[in-house]
Image (spheres, rainbow, N blue to C red):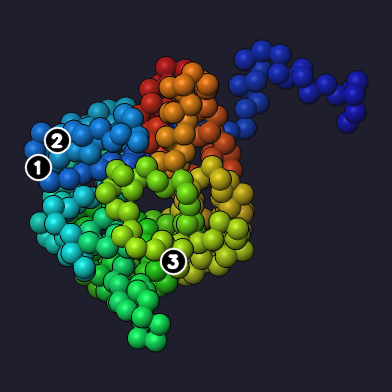
Amino acid sequence: MRFPKYRPRRLRSNELLRSLIRETHLSVKDLIMPLFVRPGSGIKNEISSMPGNYQFSTDTLVEEVREIANLGIPGVILFGIPEKKDELGTEAYADDGIIQKAIKTIKENVSNILVITDVCMCEYTDHGHCGYVKKDEKTGDHIIDNDETLKLLSKEALSHAKAGADIVAPSDMMDGRVGAIRKILDENGYENTPIMSYAAKYASAFYGPFRDAAESPPSFGDRKSYQMDASNSNEALREVSLDIEEGADIVMVKPALPYLDIIRLIKDKFGYPVAAYSVSGEFSMVKAAHEKGWLDEKAIIMESLTGIKRAGADIILTYWAKDAARWLSSS
């Protein structure tokens, strides 16, 4: 086809024509809202680096989740901020831990919403790393003991399932964690609890505001020995392949916007349900630019979320979920 016989602009001339041939349709049903919960009552503390997002106590969390459900958003993902932190992150898998309480409270008070739980150790350890830290006998350096960490993550995931979590989502990036979690869930009668693995989680500069929100920055070093190098794409395919083989039901890419190519590669190669996490840095940079008057927040958000879906994401975890749901319902 060549000009002038073919004129692509014919189908762009008005909104009715544009909508008629639109290839990607963003829906409120694509969205998951991340939430932060901490001990106490009557708490709703705004996160300074993420305006409009809060740390909740379980009572105020119920009000928030009810509002989210009423907007038609199908699920929330919970991150816990414990009262006490220790070397082994024991609050992560305590029966009366903050996430376990939050799951039960939501399930008792709100219907028609999925409760997804982040399975990791960084919020619960006093060193802020995502696993069990030991000293290397040869070098004297602190390292994350992969296989010991699997035991802790498995206990954490099981405690979430027992509390009523609909989906568990390991985000630690330890080798073999999906298989270990699938095994303990199956052995305890939770074979129908899905795993949404953070399969391709990159060591990203976009996580900064989240670490304020979850109060989980590492006290030494960084997380590059377990999270992925931003330069790599083939490695992401290997990680996803391993997680699927170990029993993951949904695979996630995190962050989203800088890794749209990874989302597309995974979707094309595996044909598996793909989630993408539009992370705190993506949210905060748009919010800051909007507050400066440099960008139209609504337009940027809707374009960004549509781009993530167009790349191949079936599920989008985003701090914009509530805003996007309102805009979608009014459009």
Dot placed on the residue nearer the N-terminal end, 2 or 3 = 2
Q: Which mark is residue 8?
A: none
- Judge by depth and name the residue closer to the eye, 139 or 272: 139
Residue 293 at what x, y percent from top left? 49, 18
Residue 252 at what x, y percent from top left? 46, 53
Residue 195 at what x, y percent from top left? 36, 59
Q: Which residue is mark 2?
A: 43
Which residue corresponds to the image point at 21% horizontal and 68% vertical from the top-left? 87
Determine contact: label 2, label 1, CB under 8 Å.
Answer: yes
Determine contact: label 2, label 3, CB under 8 Å.
Answer: no
Which residue corresponds to the image point at 32% horizontal and 54% vertical from the top-left? 217
Specify the farthest residue to the bottom: 138
Is disc 3 surrounded by few (<14), some (14 to 19) or many (20+) residues within 10 Å? some
In the rendered image, which quarter contains the N terminus?
A: top right
Please tell me in which quadrant of the rendered image residue 187 appears.
Answer: bottom left
Identified by mark 2, the residue type is Ile
Residue 124 at what x, y percent from top left? 22, 59
Secondary structure found at label 1: loop
Identified by mark 1, the residue type is Gly
Q: Which residue is mark 3?
A: 226
Identified by mark 3, the residue type is Tyr
Which residue corresponds to the image point at 49% horizontal and 69% vertical from the top-left? 242
Q: Which mark is residue 40?
A: 1
Which residue corresponds to the image point at 38% horizontal and 26% vertical from the top-left? 323
For the image shown, how many numbered marks are present on the structure?
3
Dot placed on the residue nearer the N-terminal end, 3 or 1 = 1
Secondary structure found at label 3: loop
- Judge by depth and name the residue closer to the eye, 90 or 136: 136
